Structure formats: structure tokens, C-alpha cells
Image (tube, rainbow, N blue to C red):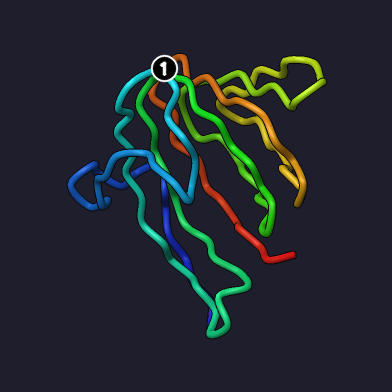
Amino acid sequence: MTIHYRAAELSNQELTEKPLEQPTAQALSGEITTRSLAFYNNDDESIKSGTWECEPGESRWEFTTRGEVIYVLSGSMTVVEDGGDAVTLTAGSSAVFPVGWCGNWTVHETLRKVFVIYAA
């Protein structure tokens, strides 16, 4: 089975809206609205993939039991791993947040990404 979707073309109405909160991440700059749609989640939930959108704000992320690979479709954010340098991600950027990555994300303009979350 091939799962195919065009994440950049989905309307906000096709995504599920909720505030950013634990266990995903902790909002640091007040309430932050996110929208998402999962396209794949295997039976043992060790892999999940879909699209995710986040409005501007700063948040704390701790990838303690899962890692994430992303591809940014639109918007921009700066990520800073604890003790590391700031990295700015914009449309066309990819990033890997391996298990153990901890740091802050600052979304500057509404960000939409494709993600793959994997278990340790």
C-alpha cells in the first residue's frame, strides 16, 4: 500500500486544531495553536507520519523516547538545542531531532511541516 498526500495543499479545515501542550511540547510564550493530520501510524505506534502546522511562539521540546524527522513546507522557525547553536529552518529545510534532543523552538511565522516520528 502506498500512502500519498499533498500536505502543502491541505486547508486548515482538513487539519485537527488544538493547543500545543505536553506530552508533545511545552508552550513558553502563552497558548500556541497547532493543526495536524496523521497519515500513517503503524500498529505498534513506533512510527507516525503526517503534517503539522504551528502558529508563532516559543516552546520547549524534549525528545526523550521518540525522535523526529521533518521537512518544512512553509514558514520559519529557529531551533536551539541545549548547549548548541541556533539553526533557522525555512521552506525546503529538513531537520532531524534524534532521541535525546532537548531544546527550544521559536516559530517566527506559521510553520507547516511533514513529519515522521519514530520510537527509540
Farthest left residue in view: 13
Residue 35, placed above or below residue 26: below
* Quarter residue 119 falls in: bottom right
Judging depth in this view, the residue of 42 and 20 nearest the camera is 20
Left or right: 2, with 88 as reference point: left
In the rendering, at what x and y percent does residue 116 appear? 60, 56
Judging depth in this view, the residue of 35 and 119 nearest the camera is 119
Residue visible at 70% across and 36% down in the picture: 102
In the rendering, at what x and y percent does residue 40 appear? 48, 70
* Quarter residue 92 falls in: top right
Label 1's element?
Answer: strand
Picture mark count:
1
In the rendering, at what x and y percent does residue 93 appear? 66, 30
Residue visible at 75% across and 25% down in the picture: 82
Residue 88, placed above or below residue 67: above
Residue visible at 44% across and 50% down in the picture: 51
Residue visible at 36% across and 56% down in the picture: 37
Q: Quadrant of the C terminus?
A: bottom right
Residue at mark 1? 109
Residue 31, placed above or below residue 39: above
Residue 28, placed above or below residue 54: above
Left or right: 85, with 59 as reference point: right
Q: Residues within 10 Å of mark 1 (few under 14, many from 20)?
A: some
In the rendering, at what x and y percent does residue 41 appear? 50, 73
- What's the amino acid at mark 1? Glu
